[in-house]
Image (cartoon, rainbow, N blue to C red):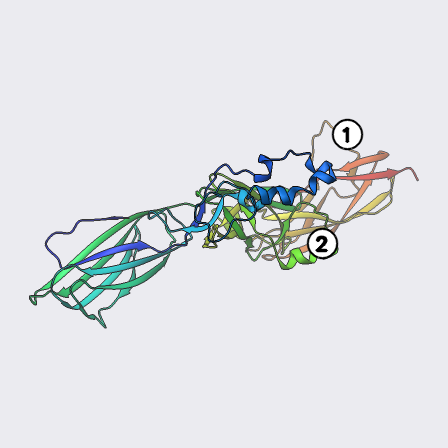
């Protein structure tokens, strides 16, 4: 972390150290099994030779080294399978300030030192985080100033801040104090650091008939592995969600254990990815969906993770939008069709007409329109148009349409439309419906 220089001579100075957990000290020396130096791989094929192994080890001083042996001569011997991992059993303290990522908790140990030969008194200390958008107060001792800091002494404190913005940040530390000569002085120091994005989230939304599927791909941009505790999709009130996973075959005991102790998903450092799939189900079918800028709002992802030694992180995505929804003012839907339709005999189709606006609409006219050059297989029997009265806002009505089929086997009911009875504006066209026409 860099500190901006301050003008003038001061008795006090700030020192800042980041508080974070140590890392494993990993060494990868070439280790050998001491037994391989004296016997071959096939020694266990001969029971008599295998029985001589303990005596051979003792003669050649290849038994477990004594704790009093300080010669370090056994450091390249592979005496335990875990030795191959390269973990020495030691932890290493951070050697630099390190990277700070969005969603983490920035924790800093700050020490204000008196480097003069005089005692300073009545020290008011402030610590703030300044970003491009805001200034956040972390510590303020103005109501209870530090009484004194002796010559060569120091005053230490710890500050924490949940990082919620990307880009440049400045830790501003200030001190107002009386020096050894009774002169009031003001010391500002600035420590700058950059907050980076730990991961990226790419989403795809696909609508398949009545189902909506959301795929989220999470990529790790940090230099350490991330263990995903939770990647949960929080839908809006119009949706419910189901997590889709690959089929896994486990015993009943293993399944119960996995439900209690859910293993964390590992996303490897430097570009590792993991995909999540969700099925979204509309909780209010047929109703108007909430829209932002003409798009369907699905919800947002809540992501929590931990690093190698358990340091937590948490991010929330912006609202995820689905495909734009085109709302019909007036909608036609078939409610009921006879199960048996006989050639050249009238049959009745029940249809629902819905006003999806917030105002009264109508009157309406329902008729059958299509390409005049095509010969129809299903026609309206009787009056060629049905007139319906006005509909109140967000209301619906049902009516009967009398049809007749003039061709056998599989045919389509097509071209039924609803129009404004006054200006012939077409509101909706009924989707084509296949029927089977019997001869008797």
> In the shown orientation, is residue 408 left or right of residue 331?
right
Q: Is residue 111 left or right of residue 329?
A: left
Which residue sits at x=87%, y=45%? Answer: 340
Helix, strand or loop under label 1: loop
Circles 2, 1 touching at the beta carbon (< 8 Å): no
- Whether residue 428 is visible, yes or no, is no
69 and 348: which one is in front? 69
Dividing the image into 4 quarters, which one contains the C terminus? Answer: top right
Crowd tier of the residue under label 2, counting other residues whose Cα lies within 10 Å: few below 14, some 14–19, many 20 or above: some
Is residue 351 in view from this perspective?
A: yes
Q: Nearer the viewer, residue 7 or 207?
A: 7
Seen as rendered, the residue at the extreme right is 440
> Relative to 328, is 30 on the left or the right?
left
State the residue position of label 1.
375
* Relative image position of residue 385 (x, y in whole percent): 71, 44
Identity of the residue drawn at 32% across and 61% down? 159
Q: Is residue 423 left or right of residue 407?
A: left
Furthest residue to the top? 373
Instruction: Give the image quarter of residue 397.
Output: bottom right
Q: Residues within 10 Å of mark 1 (few under 14, many from 20)?
A: few
| Depth order, front residue of 361/91 | 91
Tell me residue 139's x, y (percent): 28, 64
Mark seen at residue 53? none
Pick the front one: 35 or 377: 35
Q: CA distance from mark 2 to mark 1?
A: 29 Å
Label 2 sits on residue = 398
Q: Earlier in the sequence, mark 2 or mark 1?
A: 1
Residue 229: x %, y % from top left: 54, 54
x and y percentages locating residue 63 in the rendered image = 57, 47
SS type, badge 2: strand
């Amino acid at each position: 972390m860099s500190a901006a220089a301050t003008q003038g001579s001061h008795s006090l100075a700030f020192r800042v150290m980041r508080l974070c957990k140590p890392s494993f000290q990993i060494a990868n020396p070439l280790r050998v099994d001491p037994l391989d130096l004296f016997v071959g791989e096939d020694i266990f094929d001969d029971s008599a030779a295998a029985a001589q192994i303990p005596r051979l080890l003792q003669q050649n001083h290849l038994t477990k080294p004594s704790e009093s042996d300080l010669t370090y001569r056994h450091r390249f011997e592979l005496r335990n399978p875990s030795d191959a991992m390269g973990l020495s059993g030691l932890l290493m303290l951070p050697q630099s300030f390190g990277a700070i990522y969005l969603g983490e908790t920035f924790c800093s140990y700050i020490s204000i030192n008196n480097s003069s030969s005089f005692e300073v008194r009545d020290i008011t200390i402030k610590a703030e985080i300044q970003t491009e958008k805001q200034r956040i107060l972390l510590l303020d001792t103005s109501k209870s100033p530090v009484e004194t800091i002796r010559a060569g002494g120091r005053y230490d404190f710890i500050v924490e801040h949940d990082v919620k913005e990307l880009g440049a940040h400045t830790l501003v530390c200030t001190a107002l104090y009386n020096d050894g000569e009774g002169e009031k002085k003001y010391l500002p120091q600035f420590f700058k650091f950059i907050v980076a994005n730990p991961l990226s989230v790419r989403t795809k939304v696909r609508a398949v008939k009545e189902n909506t599927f959301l795929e989220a791909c999470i990529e790790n941009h940090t230099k350490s592995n991330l263990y995903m505790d939770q990647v949960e999709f929080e839908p809006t009130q119009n949706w419910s969600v189901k997590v889709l996973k690959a089929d896994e075959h486990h015993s009943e005991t293993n399944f119960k254990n996995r439900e209690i102790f859910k293993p964390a998903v590992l996303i490897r450092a430097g570009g590792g990815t993991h995909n999540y799939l969700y099925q979204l189900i509309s909780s209010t079918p047929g109703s108007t969906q909430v829209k932002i800028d003409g798009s369907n709002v699905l919800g947002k992802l809540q992501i929590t993770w931990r690093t190698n030694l358990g340091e937590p992180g948490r991010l929330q995505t912006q609202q995820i939008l689905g495909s734009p929804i085109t709302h019909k003012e007036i909608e036609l839907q078939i409610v009921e069709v006879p199960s048996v339709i006989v050639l050249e005999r009238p049959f009745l189709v029940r249809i629902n007409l819905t006003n999806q606006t917030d105002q009264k609409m109508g009157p309406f006219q329902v008729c059958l329109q299509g390409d005049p050059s095509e010969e129809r297989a299903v026609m309206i029997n009787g009056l060629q148009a049905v007139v319906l009265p006005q509909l109140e806002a967000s209301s619906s009505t049902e009516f009967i349409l009398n049809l007749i089929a003039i061709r056998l086997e599989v045919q389509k009911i097509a071209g039924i439309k609803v129009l404004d009875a006054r200006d012939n504006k077409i509101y909706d066209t009924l989707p084509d419906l296949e029927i089977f026409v019997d001869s008797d």
